[in-house]
């Protein structure tokens, strides 16, 4: 992930963090990322993901056939009763 972020930073001419990389990737996949922070600088950084794009190589690195969703998914919740 750090390698992909470094490549994106080089191409975009600005620093792109691993968190920004994952937030942007999640949005492009149709997921709703919920980054947790209370730090004003990180909140601003987390929102700064729309003025750059993935390179084809970066996309291939991030696009894998299997991804495990972590957390609770209300669309598949089953009452334990």
Image (cartoon, helix red, strand yellow):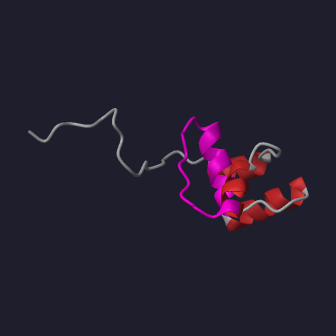
Give the position of the N terminus as an image quadrant. bottom right
Image x and y of residue 26, in percent = 59, 44
Q: Is residue 81 magenta?
A: no
Residue 77 x %, y %:
26, 37
The furthest residue to the left: 81
Residue 17: x %, y % from top left? 72, 62
Residue that protrudes farthest toward the right in the picture: 13
> Quick check: 8 left or right of 30?
right
Name the image quarter holding the C terminus. Answer: top left
Residue 34 shown in magenta: yes
Instruction: Identify which residue is drawn at 73% across, 60% down.
Output: 4
Q: Nearer the viewer, residue 2 or 43?
A: 43
Residue sitting at x 78%, y 65%: 6
- Number of numbered labels in the structure image: 0
Q: Which residue is nearer to you in this view: 81 or 5?
A: 81
The magenta stretch spans which residues? 18-40
């Amino acid at each position: 992930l750090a390698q992909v972020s470094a490549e994106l930073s080089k191409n975009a001419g600005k620093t792109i963090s691993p968190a920004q990389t994952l937030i942007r990737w999640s949005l492009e996949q149709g997921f709703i990322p919920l980054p947790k922070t209370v730090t004003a600088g990180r909140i601003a950084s987390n929102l700064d993901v729309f003025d750059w794009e993935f390179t084809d190589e970066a996309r291939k690195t991030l696009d894998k056939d299997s991804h495990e969703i972590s957390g609770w998914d209300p669309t598949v919740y089953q009452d334990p009763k």
